[in-house]
Image: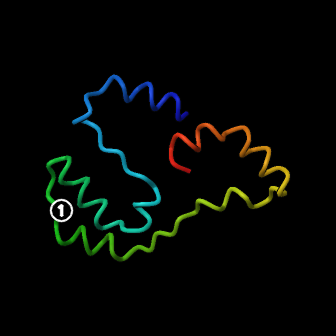
Amino acid sequence: LMDAYEAAKRSVPHDRIMEIRYEELCADPVSVVRAACEFSQLEFAPSLQRRIGSFRLRSQNEKWKEGLSPAQQDILNDCIRDCLSHWGY
């Protein structure tokens, strides 16, 4: 899926794409949505800020480990190491 995303991204002008990292959204949803609104030339209304602030986002990046033994985690990491490295993980 990430390879398909990269290929599709190459067909769109860079100034027409805004990448949002999941970790950044979880860490600071108000700022990320505000930036997305600005990028999209949409108003970031106070009511939107209040609504976003009423939710607690928590990163689930480590959830994939549940149900996998350490050996299985190592195998998975070996299989996707290049992709993880490319994306900064």
Image-based side of 2 in relation to 45, left or right? right
User: Which residue is label 1 attached to?
Assistant: 44
**Count of numbered badges drawn on the protein:** 1
Tell me: residue 35, above or below residue 77.
below
SS for dot 1: loop
Tell me: residue 30, above or below residue 69.
below
Q: Residue 76 falls in which quadrant of the image?
A: top right
Image-based side of 14 in relation to 21, left or right? left
* Image x and y of residue 18, in percent: 30, 44
Image-based side of 30 in relation to 85, left or right? left
Looking at the figure, which quarter contains the N terminus?
A: top right
Residue beneath the point at 72% across and 37% down? 79
> In this figure, which colouring scheme has been used for the structure?
rainbow
* Image x and y of residue 69, in percent: 84, 57
Could you tell me the amino acid type at mark 1?
A: Phe
Camera-nearest residue between 74 and 58 = 74
Q: Residue 82 falls in which quadrant of the image?
A: top right
Residue beneath the point at 44% across and 65% down? 26
Residue beneath the point at 58% across and 63% down? 60
Image-based side of 1 in relation to 24, left or right? right
Camera-nearest residue between 75 and 60 = 75
Residue beneath the point at 20% across and 48% down? 39
* Image x and y of residue 74, in percent: 78, 49
* Image x and y of residue 73, in percent: 77, 52
Q: Residues within 10 Å of mark 1 (few under 14, many from 20)?
A: some
